[in-house]
Image (spheres, helix red, strand yellow):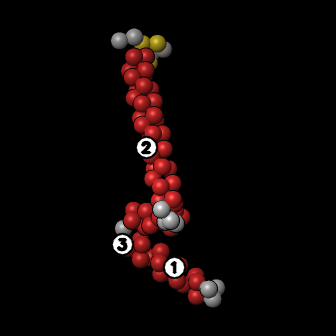
Amino acid sequence: MSEIGGIDSSRLASLIERIEHLEEEKAAIASDIRDIFAEAKGAGFDVKIMRTILKLRKMNAADRDEQEILLETYRKALDI
């Protein structure tokens, strides 16, 4: 173990390398997701709506219901 200024440099290097590896994986996954959205668009799906659906699916039912109620309230207030 080598320490420089009280810092375990081998441990720090290991942590940095692990983060870099995960960042590379994250970039690859983001690219895969973009490819799927491009495929969906090519098949005639509305990608903006798909993103909204994904966002809604991440929410719990109570939060989703609250958002829908607020949206409807605002729409009525603006006569939309």
Residue type at numbered disc 2 = Ile
Which of the pair 49/56 is nearer the observer? 49
| Image quadrant assignment for residue 2 | top left
Q: Are marks 2 and 3 in contact (CB under 8 Å)?
A: no
Label 1 residue SS: helix
Label 3 residue SS: helix
Density class for disc 2 (Cα within 10 Å; few <14, some 14-19, many ≥20) is few
Q: Which mark is residue 29?
A: 2
Which of the pair 78/27 is nearer the observer? 27
Q: Where, quadrant-wise, is the C terminus in this rendering?
A: bottom right
- Upstream in sequence: badge 3 or badge 1: 3
Density class for disc 1 (Cα within 10 Å; few <14, some 14-19, many ≥20) is few
Residue type at numbered disc 1 = Leu
Q: Where, quadrant-wise, is the N terminus in this rendering?
A: top left
Pointer 1 residue = 70
Q: Residue at x 49, y 65 (%)?
A: 45
> CA–CA distance between discs 3 and 1?
14 Å
Q: Which mark is residue 61?
A: 3
